[in-house]
Image: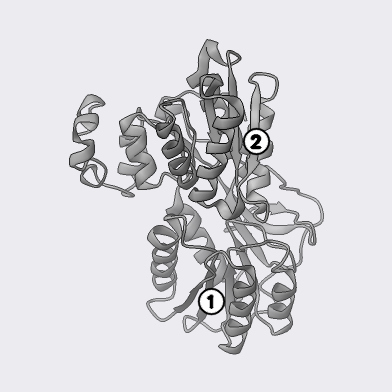
């Protein structure tokens, strides 16, 4: 997936970006395609995704990237794929395998942005440029694309404040952040705090191990026990998967309070329709996936990145990385048609199954 207050109406949701977040114009990086030889369309792209707990990676990212690579290489390029299943050691081993397979360029969505650093260096030493995808990995990265992650947190925080309205300080909220190994989670948290601090009372806050819904569920049960269910008025959840675990705990306690999310997972959208989840953050995956494919192919073919990556970002270990930062949209029941349905992510039939048909009808989703 991320600055000002936003309207819920779809026309006001899109967040326009120039050079944002950690984007910096200083410290230009040398042409990142210089280390790759021009192989024409016969290129081999390595793709390493971090986990399969979140539906987006297998459902959207992988097939979209594979399709775009084919399109950009006249069906001659190939994608070699592996998923680390949330294990940083496994992902480092997968980088070694990609080096052995002599891929021409490697796309990495890091499980742990710091732990991958030595493997990124190893790939570069083997003449394989690395493109960081969705999470900014450390090491000599040649290019990067992601969403404006701080704005994601701000968008979630603004939505929660809107849902709470005049009751924002009448009780306590629980903050369920993502995994500490994911640099994006820190940015989501920072953005959310910048909006929420001083405007709500934060009763409990957790960094959720591995982003797992079951861990979020356990944390939420602990928060309910510690704070008392009558005192909880809302939950900041950093993504939809965790929101599912949180809502299960809330239901068991007889609570229905506003809960945020992110990723516009199908189950999350259905919970929004049903009214058990207030919002999600829709991140246009096709744009992000197409961008990383364009970056990878351009690097492998020795082309200039200026038109594909107009921004610059800094990681803890590198400066001036050519990048493209993509905007996000706040998703509520009011703009489902204008976001995930319009973009072809889901059909009305996907969302409005028999269990949700009545709820869909209430909001005009038929």
Tell me residue 285's x, y (percent): 45, 52
Quarter occupied by residue 144: bottom right
Tell me residue 83's x, y (percent): 50, 70
The residue at which mark 1 appears reads as: 46
In the rendered image, is residue 342 in sight? no
In the rendered image, is residue 225 in sight? yes
The residue at which mark 2 appears reads as: 205
**SS assignment at label 2:** strand
4 vs 106: above or below: above
> Which one is in front, 29 or 221?
221
Compared across the picture, whether 213 is left or right of 148 comes to: left
**SS assignment at label 1:** strand
Tell me residue 49's x, y (percent): 53, 66
277 vs 34: above or below: above
277 vs 214: above or below: above
In this view, the residue farthest toward the top is: 166
Give the class, few, some or many, for how many residues have Cα within 10 Å of label 1's Cα (few <14, many ≥20): many
Tell me residue 308's x, y (percent): 57, 58
Compared across the picture, whether 360 is left or right of 304 comes to: left
> Which one is in front, 207 or 332?
207
């Amino acid at each position: 997936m991320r600055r000002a207050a936003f309207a819920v109406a779809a026309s006001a949701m899109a967040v326009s970006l120039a050079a944002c977040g950690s984007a910096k114009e200083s410290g230009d990086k040398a042409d990142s395609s210089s280390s790759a030889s021009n192989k024409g369309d016969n290129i081999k792209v390595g793709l390493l995704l971090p986990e399969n707990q979140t539906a987006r990676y297998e459902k959207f990212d992988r097939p979209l990237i594979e399709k775009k690579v084919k399109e950009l290489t006249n069906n001659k390029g190939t994608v070699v794929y592996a998923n680390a299943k949330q294990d940083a050691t496994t992902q480092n081993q997968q980088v070694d395998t990609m080096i052995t397979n002599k891929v021409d360029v490697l796309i990495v969505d890091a499980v742990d942005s710091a732990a991958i650093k030595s493997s990124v260096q190893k790939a570069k030493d083997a003449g394989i440029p690395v493109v960081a995808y969705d999470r900014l990995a450390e090491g000599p990265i040649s290019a990067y694309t992601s969403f404006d992650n701080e704005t994601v947190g701000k968008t979630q925080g603004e939505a929660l404040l809107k849902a709470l309205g005049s009751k924002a300080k009448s009780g306590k909220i629980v903050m369920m952040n993502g995994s500490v190994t994911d640099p994006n989670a820190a940015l989501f948290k920072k953005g959310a705090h910048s909006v929420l601090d001083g405007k709500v009372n934060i009763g409990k806050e957790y960094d959720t191990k591995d982003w797992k819904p079951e861990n979020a569920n356990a944390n939420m049960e602990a928060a309910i026990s510690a704070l008392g269910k009558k005192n909880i008025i809302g939950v900041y959840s950093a993504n939809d998967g965790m929101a599912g675990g949180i809502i299960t705990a809330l239901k068991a306690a007889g609570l229905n309070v506003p809960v945020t999310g992110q990723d516009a997972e199908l189950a999350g959208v259905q919970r929004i329709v049903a009214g058990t989840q207030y919002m999600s953050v829709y991140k246009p995956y096709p744009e992000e996936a197409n961008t990383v494919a364009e970056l990878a192919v351009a690097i492998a073919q020795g082309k200039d990145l200026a038109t594909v990556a107009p921004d610059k970002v800094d990681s803890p270990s590198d400066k001036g990385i050519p990048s493209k930062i993509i905007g996000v949209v706040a998703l509520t029941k009011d703009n489902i048609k204008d976001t995930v349905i319009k973009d072809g992510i889901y059909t009305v039939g996907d969302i409005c199954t028999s269990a949700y048909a009545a709820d869909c009808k209430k909001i005009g989703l038929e």
